[in-house]
Image (cartoon, coloured by chain):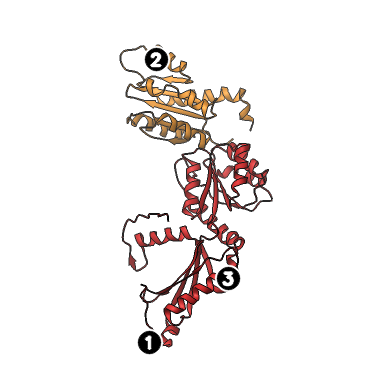
Chain colours: A red, B orange
C-alpha cells in the first residue's frame, strides 16, 4: 500500500514546490511526485510503456493514476525524465588492448548508462565490422592508444568503420594525435570528438566520454525513439535510466550540499 | 619527430625498484617519455603498455636472480603483439650463482633481447647505447619515414 498525503485543501497543492520525476521504461511509464522543500514523496503513478506507438498515451495513463492517488495534481516546478525505453541505449565499444583502452571504453559506456551489446579490441577484422553492422548499435565509442601512443590501430579501425554501413553516431575518445585523421576517415558520420579515455598508460579519464555519450543519448536517441513526442509533458530527459540510478546511488553515498551521505554504497542489479 | 617513448619496470615477483627508478629518472632527464610500470610487473604487462603507448623500447630490470625464468619468451610476446622490431633491453642481477657475465649476456641475447647489462651499469652508459641503437635503426627502418 502506498501512503499518500491527504490534502487539506487544493491551496496547499498549488503553493508547494513539487517535482514530477518520470521514468520512461520499457514495460512501464513510472512517475513519482516529490515535495522538494519537505523532501517527501507525495505519491506514485504508473502507466504502460507506449514507446512503440505513442509515448504520450502511457504518460497520460500514469498521470491519471498519480492523480487518483493524490486527489489533485500539484503544479510541478520541475518535470524531469530518464529513459530506458525501446531497449535502452545500445552501444558498442572498440579499443586497442583488451585490458587497457578497450576496458576504459567499456567503463565509460557502462558509466553513461548504456547497454553494452559488443566490445571489440585490436584491429577490427572484416567479420568484426559485419558483426557490428548486425548489432546495429545506437552509438559506438571508438578508443585506442594513449595520447601520443599507438595511432595505427585506431586509424585502421576508423577506416574500417568509415567504410561500413553503420549509421549510428560515433564518439571518438582515443589517442589525441590520431583524432584529426580519424575525423577524416569518418567524414559524413555523426561524430563527437572528446578526450582520450586513457590519456596516459593506466590513467582512466572516462568522464568526458561519458558526458559525450549522454549528450548523444539526449540529442539523438530520445528523438529517434519518439520520447520527445511527449515533450510538452516534461521539461527534459536528463539521462538514461541506468545512469540515473547510478547518480542516485552516488548521491546517497556522497551526499550533496547540506546533507551528508551514507558512505560507501554498493549497487546491486536484480534481474526479473 | 615526437619524443621517443620507453617502457621500464621490474619483471616478475621482484620488488627491487630502486635501480629501475633511478634509471627511469635518468632516461626522463635525457628527454625520453618514460612509462614506468614499477615493481612486480608481469612480462605481458610490459608488452601491453608498449602497444598502447607505441613505445620505441622496453627496458626490463631484474635483481632477484629469477630473471632468466621471468624473461623467457619475452621476445615472443612482443612478436605476438605486433612489436616485432621493438628494442628490448634487460639488466640487473639476472642469474643466480657464479656465472661469467659473457655467458649470461649471450644467453639473454639468444632469448631475443637486443642488449643485456650487468649489475652496476651506469645510467649514462645506458643512455649513450640507447641513442646509438636508435640512430642505427633509424637509418634502415622504413617505419621511421612516417
Residue shown at the point (57%, 62%) measured from the top left: A222
Residue B128 in sight here = no
Residue shown at the point (42%, 54%) measured from the top left: A271
Crowding at dot 3, Cα within 10 Å, few <14 / some 14-19 / many 20+, comes out as some
* Residue position for label 2: B104
Tell me whether the residue at label 2 lies in contact with that at label 3, contact meaning CB atoms closer than 8 angstroms: no
Q: Is residue B35 above or below residue A110?
A: above
Residue shown at the point (43%, 31%) measured from the top left: B8
Would you say A4 lies left or right of B81 here?
left
Between the C-alphas of marks 1 and 2, the distance is: 91 Å
* Residue position for label 3: A231
Q: Is residue A148 above or below residue A271?
A: above
Q: Pick the residue in front: A184 or A235.
A: A235
Q: Quadrant of residue B42?
A: top left
Which chain is mark 2 on?
B
* Residue position for label 1: A8
Tell us which disc is closer to us: 1 or 3.
Answer: 1
Q: Tell me, yes or no, whether dots 2 and 3 are on the same chain.
A: no
Crowding at dot 2, Cα within 10 Å, few <14 / some 14-19 / many 20+, comes out as some
Label 2: state its secondary structure.
helix
Quadrant the C terminus of chain A occupies: bottom left
Tell us which disc is closer to us: 1 or 2.
Answer: 1
Label 1: state its secondary structure.
loop
Amino acid at each position: 500500500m502506498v501512503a499518500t498525503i491527504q490534502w487539506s485543501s487544493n491551496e496547499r497543492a498549488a503553493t508547494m514546490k513539487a517535482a514530477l520525476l518520470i521514468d520512461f521504461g520499457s514495460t512501464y511509464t513510472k512517475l513519482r511526485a516529490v515535495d522538494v522543500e519537505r523532501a517527501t514523496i507525495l505519491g506514485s503513478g504508473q502507466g504502460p510503456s507506449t514507446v512503440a506507438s505513442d509515448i504520450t498515451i502511457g504518460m497520460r495513463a500514469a498521470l491519471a493514476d498519480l492523480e487518483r492517488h493524490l486527489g489533485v495534481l500539484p503544479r510541478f516546478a520541475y518535470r524531469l525524465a530518464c529513459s530506458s525505453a525501446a531497449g535502452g541505449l545500445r552501444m558498442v565499444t572498440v579499443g586497442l588492448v583488451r585490458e587497457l583502452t578497450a576496458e576504459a571504453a567499456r567503463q565509460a559506456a557502462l558509466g553513461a548508462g548504456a547497454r553494452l551489446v559488443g566490445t571489440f579490441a585490436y584491429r577490427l577484422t572484416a567479420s568484426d565490422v559485419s558483426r557490428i553492422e548486425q548489432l546495429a548499435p545506437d552509438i559506438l565509442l571508438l578508443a585506442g592508444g594513449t595520447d601520443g601512443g599507438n595511432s595505427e590501430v585506431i586509424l585502421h579501425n576508423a577506416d574500417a568503420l568509415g567504410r561500413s554501413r553503420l549509421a549510428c553516431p560515433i564518439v571518438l575518445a582515443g589517442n589525441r594525435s590520431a583524432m584529426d585523421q580519424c575525423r577524416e576517415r569518418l567524414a559524413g558520420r555523426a561524430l563527437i570528438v572528446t578526450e582520450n579515455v586513457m590519456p596516459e598508460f593506466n590513467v582512466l579519464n572516462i568522464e568526458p566520454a561519458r558526458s559525450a555519450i549522454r549528450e548523444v543519448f539526449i540529442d539523438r536517441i530520445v528523438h529517434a525513439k519518439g520520447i520527445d513526442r511527449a515533450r510538452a509533458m516534461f521539461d527534459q530527459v536528463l539521462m538514461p535510466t541506468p545512469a540515473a540510478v547510478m547518480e542516485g546511488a552516488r548521491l546517497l553515498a556522497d551526499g550533496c550540499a547540506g546533507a551528508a551521505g551514507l558512505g560507501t554504497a554498493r549497487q546491486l542489479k536484480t534481474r526479473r | 619527430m615526437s619524443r621517443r617513448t620507453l617502457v621500464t619496470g621490474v619483471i616478475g615477483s621482484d620488488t627491487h625498484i630502486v635501480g629501475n627508478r633511478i634509471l627511469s629518472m635518468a632516461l626522463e632527464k635525457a628527454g625520453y617519455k618514460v612509462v614506468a610500470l614499477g615493481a612486480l610487473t608481469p612480462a605481458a604487462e610490459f608488452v601491453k603498455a608498449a602497444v598502447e603507448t607505441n613505445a620505441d623500447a622496453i627496458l626490463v630490470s631484474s635483481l632477484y636472480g629469477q630473471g632468466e625464468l621471468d624473461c623467457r619468451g619475452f621476445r615472443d610476446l612482443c612478436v605476438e603483439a605486433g612489436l616485432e622490431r621493438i628494442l628490448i633491453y634487460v639488466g640487473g642481477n639476472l642469474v643466480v650463482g657464479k656465472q661469467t657475465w659473457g655467458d649470461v649476456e649471450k644467453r639473454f641475447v639468444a632469448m631475443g633481447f637486443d642488449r643485456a647489462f650487468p649489475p652496476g651499469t651506469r645510467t649514462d652508459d645506458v643512455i649513450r647505447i640507447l641513442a646509438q641503437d636508435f640512430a642505427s635503426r633509424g637509418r634502415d627502418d622504413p617505419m621511421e619515414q612516417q
